Amino acid sequence: MTTKKTVPKKRVAVVTGGAQKKTPDLHQPAAIPLIMYRRIALTFIILVACALLAVLYLSTVQAVIHVESSQAPVTTEFVANVFATPTRPTDVHGQILSGTLGKTQSFTPTGTSSKTVEDISTGTVKIYNNLSFAQALVATTRLLSQEGILFRLKSAVTIPAGGSVEAQVYADLPGASGDIKPTRFTIPGLSEARQSAVYAESSEAFTGGVSTIAIVSQEEMEAAALTLQESLMNDAKEMLLAEADETFSGASYEAETVEKVFSVEPGTEAKAFDVTLTIKVTAVFYDKQALEKIATAKLYEGLGQGQEFVQVDPSTMVVSVDGVNQENQEANIHVTLSAPAITSQTSEALHVARFVGMTEQEVSDLLLAEGVATNVQVDFFPFWVHTVPRLKDHIYIDIR
């Protein structure tokens, strides 16, 4: 007999009267509010902007220090040997010549040293005669000026009736009183009636009452001799240059006084004096270009560390004769060459690390106090920067 297996039925609860409620899933994450996303995005943007600004600042910040460098002369001074046949690189090819010249020249004292002496004042007058007959006046006739100064006729004259003549007069007494301005004169020797009809007038001032006599001083005599020597030197240079080898572009001269004679003694009153002078001139002709190269090389040897020349001009070289042996055609010449030097970029005083963090005033005070510069100006970028940045490769030195 077949046995039926009974399957138990499940009961299902039926909810009526509303929607079925869902049970929350505890493993599902909670929703993030939109305002939080906005804050995160804004923060990110701000951070990126700050980073960009920082990068922009670090890439553009800079300081340019403009330095007007102080100049200091660098000088080289040495003795070069001149030979007809030089054997060393430091020797110079040259030629030695000499000659003797003499001359006498007259000089007028300058009056720097002088004395004042009294003399007789003189002048010219015009004598008028308003009478109907001629009036004769003898030499030494007195003429009295309106100032009361007495003069006398130098020579006799006759003034025609109604006419006039010019005559020379001189002061009765020596001294400055006779130096008078144009005036009218009466003739005291005539009667009072004639004095109004016969009179004299001057149109120019009288001079000569006081004169200055020059005294020749020792200084003036030596100055005259020096002037004459310069004239003789110019003549000697032309003479010796005409004899020298044309290949030599440089020359130095030495003068030796053989004779010097003056026509007066110091302190003598004289209107002129003579100077007689004889000199021996020795000329050393040399290869100027070769000497300039030697002088320039020695000048650079004396240049200090951290310095550079503004300009080296070999043509400013000063050469003088130091010693001569004309027989052997040998000479020693004294050479001097100078050039202005300024502080260079390699100087420790301008190392950029020194200025990190300084203001413009601090940089200026430092360099001026050390004598490196005469003026300092610092340009900062961007405009809000006021101190030298710590990035050394953003600090620039401009030397003027």
Image: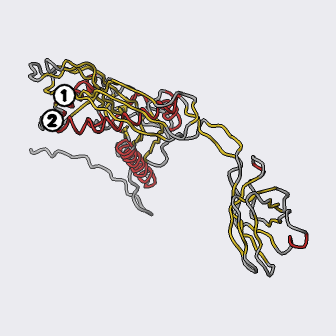
Q: Is residue 274 above or below residue 28?
A: above
Which percent across, then down, holds residue 112?
59, 38
Residue visible at 47% across and 42% down in the picture: 377
Which percent across, then down, holds residue 233?
31, 35
Which residue is at the front of the view, 261 or 226?
261
N-terminal label among 1 and 2: 1
Which residue is at the front of the view, 195 or 216?
195
Q: Judging from the image, what secondary structure is the residue with disc 1 in?
A: strand
What type is the residue that disc 1 sits on?
A: Leu
Residue visible at 25% across and 18% down in the picture: 323
Q: Which residue is mark 2?
A: 243
What type is the residue that disc 2 sits on?
A: Glu
| Location of the C terminus (image quadrant) | top left
Q: Which residue is mark 1?
A: 97
In the rendered structure, the answer to whether residue 221 lies left or right of residue 255 reads right
CB atoms of marks 1 and 2 within 8 Å: yes
Picture quadrant where residue 340 is located: top left
In the rendered structure, the answer to whether residue 388 lies left or right of residue 199 reads left
